[in-house]
């Protein structure tokens, strides 16, 4: 019995040992779970904090981009500011800025966003610090570096912004471009004919301001036209059966459009949705800003002056990056002062010598890459040397270029039907010049700063041509390289698609072949882009424009009955991120981001480059 009891006690003690092991094991597991949970909680908290800093750093970089945009809007010349020690600003065209920041920001009066290195400053994202203590230790911060080396060529500024929160930094690179007329394939201020060529009694108003618009001739998009790109008019649009493949907006506060109906006027096709309201865009008063780019005394603003020509000037663009320029009344191709105090031909290798420009062959030159050409009226006074550059034949009243003989360019000549030619040969042989009320007043004037241009741009770069008076597209204007070639055409007054007619006993005969093509951004500052003799000569084929069109008044291309040209307008999508050099922008200046990309962080949290 005793032996059995001992045996049972022994078994019970063994069971108790196993239970103890199980209890201890379970306790250990629970302890480990608790410790692991605490560790996980602490780790997650740390990771969450890191993630928040990481996301905040990107937001801070964006804040830097937006802050820089606001500076440009307030002060367009701010593009020249930056930190010349920045590696991104190579070849160091930027200069140090001294700009007052908002008084609430706990920073000094120089722009802290231009800081570099461990001792350099960072700008503070407004609202990310404690306004009571003014402590910025945990605030979101940013720096940016400016590359303005291509701004004067393409209108684009490249900005590299780095945001910082805690020990996290992130960087982005953004291309900024001034928003302007070339954001649209088609832009107009008024949807009426230019009063200067239609009815001068017209008092220009937008239809939504005055629906009657006495004496003003409203123009309608017609059936068969194709518009492939964004469209904006400050006026109320009149639409027939045009196919619109881009967004269409209007400055009419009520939005929408007018549908006149009737024979030959079907409903338009709006493939991107209904016409929507968008604020009006103001036109500049003139294109003289481009003339400023030919001054040699503005070394900081105009490091590479373009070419200035005087009086009627013809330019023929050639394959191989060349052009032929004929400008018999040009004396100086660069000027100094405003008003002009003197001029020179020091860059005659670029713009041509006086002798070559006056010759019958003209001057064969390299197209000025990423630069401008401006054609001015002959000054009636002043010291730029052109006041004496014209004479008038006392017996015929016709013009003669300075120093021209009867056998040289600019001689006293007429075409076959008795009209006096200007110094570069317009009106052409057998042409009856357009008259007021049909397409142009004072066509081919002797002393006007008129540009006659045609040919193929093949320089592999940008070019802007501008005229103080008219621009005439006298033939097709095309690109050899649709990736790198880019042309801007800016007329202070009208831009005409040359469509010459011979008139005999009231019958009009066209002197040019049908259909025309223009590859360019076209802007008529004070008047219109239109076809000469659009209402006569029957059907003329298709006017193809690959680029952008902007004008103050709507230009007539063809009539609803088929006379003139039909439209084939296509937007040059490169204009969303680039522009022809020195191309004009609206009066109100804003900059938009055209391209951005995140890159590896540029700076460490301590401010040094990685």
Image (spheres, grey):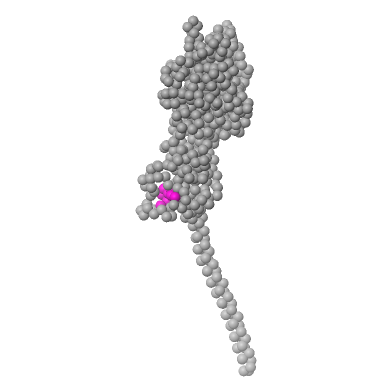
Q: Quadrant of residue 597?
A: top right
Residue 33 in the figure: left or right of residue 340: right
Residue 469 location in percent, x, y? 48, 20
Which residue sits at x=49%, y=17%? 448
Whether residue 224 can be seen here: no
Residue 435 location in percent, x, y? 51, 12
Which residue sits at x=55%, y=16%? 424
Question: Which quadrant would the N terminus be assigned to in this image?
Answer: bottom right
Q: Read off the magenta span.
A: 120-129
Is residue 588 shown in magenta?
no
Q: Quadrant of residue 137?
A: bottom left
Which residue sits at x=58%, y=16%? 360
Q: How many marks?
A: 0
As rendered, which of 328 and 427 lies closer to the eye? 328
Compared to residue 164, the image places residue 585 above or below, namely: above
Q: Residue furthest top?
A: 395
């Amino acid at each position: 019995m005793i032996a059995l009891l001992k045996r049972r006690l022994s078994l019970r003690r063994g069971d108790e040992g196993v239970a103890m092991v199980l209890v201890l094991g379970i306790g250990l597991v629970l302890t480990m779970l608790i410790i692991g949970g605490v560790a996980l909680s602490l780790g997650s908290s740390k990771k969450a904090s890191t993630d928040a800093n990481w996301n905040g750093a990107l937001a801070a970089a964006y804040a830097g981009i937006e802050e820089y945009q606001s500076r440009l809007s307030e002060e367009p010349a701010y593009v020249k500011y930056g930190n010349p020690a920045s590696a991104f600003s190579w070849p160091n065209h930027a200069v140090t800025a001294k700009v007052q920041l908002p008084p609430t920001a706990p920073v000094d009066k120089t722009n802290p966003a231009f800081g570099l290195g461990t001792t350099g400053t960072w700008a503070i994202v407004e609202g990310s610090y404690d306004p009571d203590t003014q402590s910025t230790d945990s605030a979101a911060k940013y720096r940016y570096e400016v590359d303005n080396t291509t701004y004067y060529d393409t209108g684009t500024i490249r900005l590299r912004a780095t945001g910082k929160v805690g020990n996290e930094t992130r960087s982005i690179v953004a291309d900024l471009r001034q928003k302007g007329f070339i954001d649209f394939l088609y832009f107009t201020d008024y949807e009426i004919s230019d009063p200067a060529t239609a009815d001068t009694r017209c008092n220009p108003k937008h239809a939504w301001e005055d629906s009657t618009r006495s004496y003003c001739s409203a123009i309608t998009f017609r059936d068969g036209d194709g518009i492939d790109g964004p469209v904006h008019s400050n006026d109320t649009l009149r639409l027939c059966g045009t196919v619109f493949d881009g967004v269409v907006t209007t400055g009419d506060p009520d939005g929408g459009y007018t549908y006149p109906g009737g024979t030959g006027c079907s409903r338009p096709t709006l493939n991107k949705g209904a016409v929507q309201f968008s604020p009006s865009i103001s036109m500049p008063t003139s294109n003289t800003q481009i003339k400023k780019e030919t001054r040699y005394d503005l070394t900081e603003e105009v490091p590479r002056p373009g070419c200035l020509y005087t009086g009627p000037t013809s330019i023929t663009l050639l394959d191989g990056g060349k052009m032929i320029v004929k400008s018999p009344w040009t004396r100086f191709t660069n000027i100094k002062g405003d008003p002009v105090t003197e001029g020179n031909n020091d860059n005659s290798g670029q713009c041509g010598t006086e002798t070559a420009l006056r010759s019958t062959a003209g001057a064969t030159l390299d197209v000025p890459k990423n630069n401008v050409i401006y054609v001015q009226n002959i000054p009636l006074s002043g010291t730029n040397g052109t006041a004496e550059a014209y004479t008038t034949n006392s017996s015929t009243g016709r013009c003669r270029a300075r120093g021209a003989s009867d056998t040289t360019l600019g001689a006293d000549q007429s075409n076959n039907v008795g009209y006096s030619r200007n110094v570069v040969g317009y009106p052409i042989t057998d042409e009856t010049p357009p008259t007021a009320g049909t397409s142009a007043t004072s066509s081919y004037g002797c002393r006007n700063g008129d540009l006659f241009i045609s040919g193929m741009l093949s320089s592999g770069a940008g070019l802007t041509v501008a005229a103080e008076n008219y621009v005439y597209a006298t033939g097709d204007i095309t690109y050899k390289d649709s990736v790198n070639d880019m042309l801007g055409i800016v007329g202070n007054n009208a831009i005409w698609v040359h469509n010459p007619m011979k008139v005999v006993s009231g019958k009009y005969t066209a002197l040019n072949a049908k259909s025309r093509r223009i590859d360019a951004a076209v802007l008529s500052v004070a008047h219109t882009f239109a076809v000469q003799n659009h209402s006569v000569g029957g059907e003329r084929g298709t006017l193809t424009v690959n680029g952008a069109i902007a004008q103050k008044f709507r230009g007539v291309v063809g009539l609803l009955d088929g006379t003139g040209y039909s439209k084939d307008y296509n937007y040059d999508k490169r204009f969303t991120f680039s522009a022809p050099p020195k191309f004009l922008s609206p009066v109100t200046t804003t900059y938009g981001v055209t391209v951005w990309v995140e890159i590896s962080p540029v700076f460490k949290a301590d401010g040094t480059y990685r």
